[in-house]
Image: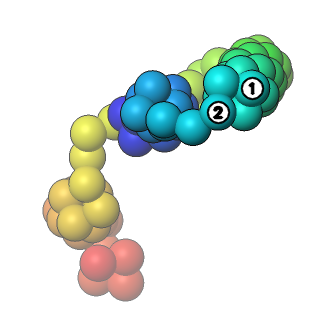
Amino acid sequence: MSILWAQIMPFVALQLYNGDDVVKDAITTYLAGSFSFWLVLNAIFFRTIDLKFLKTFFGTLTAPQYTCELYRTGDGDALK
């Protein structure tokens, strides 16, 4: 979610910009180009990874919850 937020907020900040229109147009062009480049790179990335690992990129489990899960599911004292 934070990745999407980081892509949206520059456009929101640009709407609040009260400067010169020429500068605003240049910034808009730069932001649109950067956003397009980001989309292309993400598409390439997700097309080239092994899809069985796709689930590892998304989840709601926090680090402390993950640590507790590893402890509970550990097979021996050495792993715990």
Tell me if 63 is positioned left or right of 4 in this view: left
Q: Nearer the viewer, residue 4 or 68?
A: 4
* Residue type of the residue flagged with mark 1: Val
Circles 2 and 1 in contact, beta carbons < 8 Å: yes
Tell me if 1 is positioned left or right of 18 in this view: left
Q: Quadrant of the N terminus?
A: top left
Residue beneath the point at 41% across and 33% down: 16
Give the CA distance from mark 2 to mark 1: 6 Å
Q: Quadrant of residue 32?
A: top right
Name above or below for residue 19 compared with residue 73: above
Residue beneath the point at 74% across and 26% down: 22
Residue 24 place in picture, x, y as percent: 65, 28
Report helix, strand or loop for mark 2. Answer: loop
Question: Quick check: can you spot residue 18?
Answer: yes
Name above or below for residue 63 compared with residue 31: below
Residue 48 place in picture, x, y as percent: 81, 22
* Residue 55 disc label: none
Tell me if 62 is positioned left or right of 8 in this view: left
Which residue matches tag 1? 22
Q: Quadrant of residue 80?
A: bottom left
Which residue matches tag 2? 20
Residue 5 place in picture, x, y as percent: 41, 34
Report helix, strand or loop for mark 1. Answer: helix
* Residue type of the residue flagged with mark 2: Asp
